[in-house]
Image (spheres, helix red, strand yellow):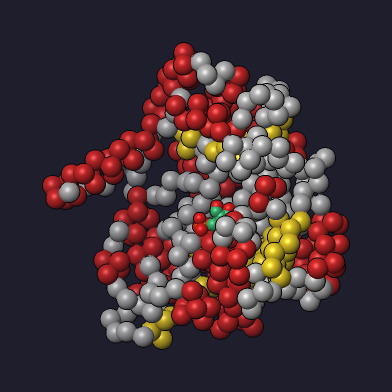
Amino acid sequence: MGYDRVRRRDPAVADALDGERARQNDTLAMIASENHVSQTVMEAQSSELTNNYAEGYPGGRYYGGCEYADDVEQLAIDRAKELWGADHVNVQPHSGSQANMGVYLAMLEPGDKILSLDLTHGGHLSHGHPANFAGQVYDVSQYHVDPDTGYIDYEAMREKAEEIKPDIIVSGFSAYPRDVDWERFQAAADAVGAYHVADIAHTTGLVAAGVHSSPVGIADFVTGSTHKTIRSGRGGIIMCDEEHADDVDSAVFPGAQGGPLLHNIAGKAVGFGEALEPGFQDYAEQVVANAAALGERLAEHGLELVSGGTDTHLVLVDLRPSHPDTTGKEVEEALEDAGIVLNANTVPGESRSAFNPSGIRAGTPALTTRGFDEAACREVADLIVEVVDDPDDGAVRHRVRDRVDELTDRYPLYDESEP
Ligand SMILES: Cc1ncc(COP(=O)(O)O)c(C=O)c1O
C-alpha cells in the first residue's frame, strides 16, 4: 500500500506516514499491547465506510444507507462469536477503554463500587484510576498481587470483596504475565452479589486460540481491545450473555458513543476472519513460546522477572535487584535509541514513580507477526541486556542498533507478496 495520493496532496502528512512505516519496519516493536495487522486489515480499515453514519445496530439503524454497514458489522459479530464462543457480542466500542465504559454504564450508577487490580501491580487506568473517568465517577478499591510471588493474591482479593461489597469486580490486566483463574474472580463476585468483568484487552488473541484460559462463559462480562494479540481492526469489544445484551448495547450506543467507526469494524471483521484460519493457532502458540524464551534468557543474564516467568505474551522485569541504580525510563530511552521499542513499567512494590518506574515490560506479539522464533527472541534478550547493563554508553547502543538492523532485514515487515 502506498500513500501516493497523500504525497501529492499533503506531503507533510505523507512524510509522517512514510516515517512511521519506516520506523515500524526498522525497529523491534515490543510494546506488549502492539501488533502489526495485515495489509488486508489496513485496507479494510481505510474503506468508504468511514463516511457512513450507522447509529444503532444491524437491522435497526437511525439513518438510511446502512445496508453494507449492516453486512460488515454482522460479519464481525458472527466471527467474534465463533472465535470466543460468546452468546452476545458488541463490536462497536471505539477502544478497549470504551468497552469497559460500556459495561460500567450498563450495570453501575455513579458512586457505585468497583474492585480492581492496582495500576502499579498490572491493572489499567480504565479499571478506576483517579485520572480516568472510572476513578472519578465510581468508588474504587484495589486488590494486589502477592509481593513475594508476583501472582494475584486471590484470597486477599476475596477478603477485600467481602469487606467492601463492590458492585463490580474487574479482572484482566495490562502488565500481568500469568494465566488467570477466572472462576475464583467469579466466585468472589457471586459471593457478594457483584458482577465480574474480565478485561482481556491484551490476551484476546491468546484466548481465541486457546493458549490462555478463557473467561467467556465464566465472567458476567468480557471486554477487550481488538488490535492487540487478536491483530484485527483497531477498537474494542464486549461479550456477555443474552440477559445483559440490551443493557450493554444501549450503554455503548447511545450511552457512551454516537456513530460506530464502521471502517474499523470492517478491519475487525477481516482480522477476526484471519484469526479463524488455522495459521492463527500457530501464531498464538509462537507468541507465548517466544515470550517464554525471551524471559528465560533475560533471567539467565541475571534480570529478575516479576512472578519468575510468563505464561503469556509479555514479561515484566523488575530492574531493582540486578540494576538498583537504573530506572525503567532510562532503559526505555536507551533501548529506543538502539531500535528496540518497549516501555518502562511500574512493578509490584514500586519504590519510584509511575513516570520513572523500576521496571520494563516487553511483549512478543508484534515480533512474532514478523516471523521471530525462540532463537531470535533469545538474541533480542541478549541485546536488551547489553543496553540495560550500560544505558549511557553510545557505542553499546550503536552496536545493538546494527544487530537490530540485521534482525529487521532478516524478518521484514509487510512483505509485498502478502496475499
Ligand atoms: C487491560 C486493559 N484494558 C483496557 C485497555 C485499553 O485499551 P484501549 O487502548 O484500546 O482503550 C488496555 C490497554 O492496553 C489494557 O491493557
Residue 325 lies in what quarter of the image? top right
**Observer-nearest residue: 262 or 166?**
166
Residue ID at (75%, 70%) = 166
Q: Is residue 378 visible?
A: no
Is residue 226 among the parts visible in the rendering?
yes
* 412 in relation to 69, above or below: above
Whole-percent x and y of residue 359? Answer: 64, 35
- Residue most extreme to the left: 8
State the residue in front, 177 or 214.
177
Residue nearest the observer in this picture, 321 or 201: 321
Residue 23, x across and y down, in percent = 36, 35
Q: Is 246 drawn above or below residue 259 in the view shown?
A: below
Residue 43 image point, x, y percent: 31, 55
Residue 7 vs residue 136, the one in the foreground: 136
**Residue visible at 49% across and 42% down in the picture:** 366
Is residue 381 shown above or below 354? above
In the rendered view, would you say 315 is above or below 335?
below
Ligand 1 lies in quarter: bottom right
Is residue 30 shown left or right of residue 124?
left
Could you tell me which residue is drawn at 33 percent across and 60 percent down? 44
- Dividing the picture into quadrants, the one containing residue 201 is bottom right
